[in-house]
Image (spheres, rainbow, N blue to C red):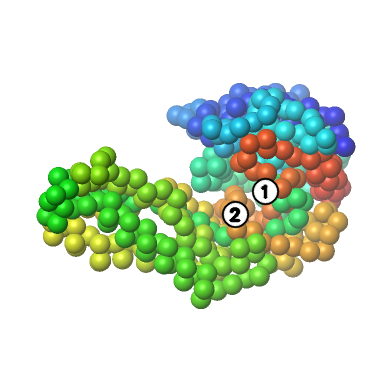
Amino acid sequence: MPAPLTRHWLARLVAFDTTSRNPNLALVADVEAFLAANGVAFVRVEDQAQGKASLIATLGPRQEAGIILSGHTDTVPVDGQDWTSDPFVLAARDGRLYGRGACDMKGFLAVCLGLLPEMAARPLKKPIHLAFSYDEELGCLGVRPLIARFLAEGLKAEGCIVGEPTSMAVVTAHKAKRSLRTIVRGRSGHSSRAPELANAVEAAALIAAAVHRLGARLAKDGPRDGLYDVPFSTAHVGILKGGTALNIVPDHAVLEWEVRALPEEDVDAYVREIEDYARAEVLPALKARAREAEIVFELKAAFPGLATDPGAPIAVLAKAWAGRNDHCKVAYGTEAGLFAEMGGIPTIVCGPGSIAQAHQADEYVEDRQLAACEAFVRKVIAHCA
C-alpha cells in the first residue's frame, strides 16, 4: 500500500480539473503552499496569458548536479467518456485508485509530494529537483520554458526521471512526433459541374492516401527496432473533414495527420515527403481549375525522440532503483526527449501505472504501483544523500 500522504496528495491533485484547456494555477498554488510549509525553495514559470504555470522546486545544494523528478500537471478531457464514478473524486476499489490523471500522471506527482517531507529531512549531498509542467498533452509545450528556466537558474542535473506510466519499467527511448493540420481550399459549385470546379475534399483525400502509403512503406521496408512495442516508424491520418452536401462541390477540407519516427530516423524528412507530394502532384490540378486554390500545412505539435544509451549512468541507476536489469522502448512520446535535447540532461522514463489506462474512462493506478514508485523514489533520496 502507498503511504497515506501519497494517497492524500493523489486525491488532492485529481480534484483539480487540469484538463489542458483549463488553467492549472489553483493546483500550482496548492503545491507551492506545501513546498513553503516544508521550507523548500521553488520557482514558478508562468504563462500569464493562459493562466498556467510550471514549478521547479529544489531540495539540497543548488550548486551540485542532482536528480530531476519530472511530470506534467495537465490531463486529457473526460468529455464523451462513460465513467462509473466522478472522474475528479478519487475512488478506491479493489486495490485501484480511480480518477482522471490518476495514472497519467498525477500518481507520480503524488509520490513525489508524498515523500517530500522525507526528502526535506535528509542532509542531501546532491539536490533533488521537482519539475512539474503544463500542456504536455498539447505537444509538450509547458516543459520548454521550464527547461529554459532551469538552465537560466544555473541548476544542474546528472539525470532526469520522467514519471510517465511505464508500470515501473525503465524506458530508455521513445519515438519523435510531428502532427500537422493540412487545409485545402478549392472552388465550390453545383456537383453537376464538378469537372470544372476544384474539389477540396478529393484533394485532401489524395494527401491522406499519400500518408497511408508512407505508413505502409515504413511498416514493410523501414528500419526496425525490436525493443519498441511498435518496432517501426508510423504515419497515421486521424481527421478528414469537408463538404456540406452531396450536390455541392466542397471548396474547403481539413486533414490532420501525424508521423511517429524512431529517434534515429529523420521525422521531418517524412513530413517533407508528404508536403512535396501535395505541392507537386495535388496542388497543380487544383489551381488549373481555380487560381485561388491553395494547400496550407500547419504544425500542430512536435517533440523529439529519446535515445538514451542503456549503459548511461542514469539508466544503470534507474534499473537498480527499480530492482530490474532490463529496459525497453516505447512508441508514445514524453517530455524526456526535450530534457535531453534542450538541456543536455541524460533522461529516462519510469513511473507508476500502465499506459493502457491513460486517457481512458475509469482511468486508474494500482496501489502496488504507487508503492513500487515510492520504493524507487526513496532510493533516489538515498542516492542524493
Residue placed most toward the observer, 33 or 335: 335
Please, what is the three-letter code of the amino acid marked with disc 2?
Tyr
Does residue 219 show up? yes
Using a 10 Å C-alpha cutoff, classify the residue at mark 2 as few (fewer than 14 neighbours), some (14 to 19) or many (20 or more): some
Say if 175 sits above or below 49 in the image. Answer: below
| Residue behind mark 1 | 355
* Residue 327 position within the rendered picture, expressed as x and y whole percent measured from the top left: 74, 62
Quarter holding residue 189 = top left
Please give the name of the residue rendered at 86% of the width and 56% of the height, measured from the top-left corner: 323
* Label 1 residue SS: helix
User: In the rendered image, which quarter contains the N terminus?
Assistant: top right
* Residue 157 position within the rendered picture, expressed as x and y whole percent measured from the top left: 69, 51
Using a 10 Å C-alpha cutoff, classify the residue at mark 1 as few (fewer than 14 neighbours), some (14 to 19) or many (20 or more): some
- In the rendered structure, the answer to whether residue 318 lies left or right of residue 73 reads right
Residue placed most toward the observer, 77 or 30: 77
* Label 2 residue SS: loop
- In the rendered structure, the answer to whether residue 122 lies left or right of residue 244 reads right
Does residue 118 show up? no
Say if 172 sits above or below 150 in the image. Answer: below
Which residue in the rendered view is the most extreme toward the bottom? 221
Please, what is the three-letter code of the amino acid marked with disc 1?
Ile
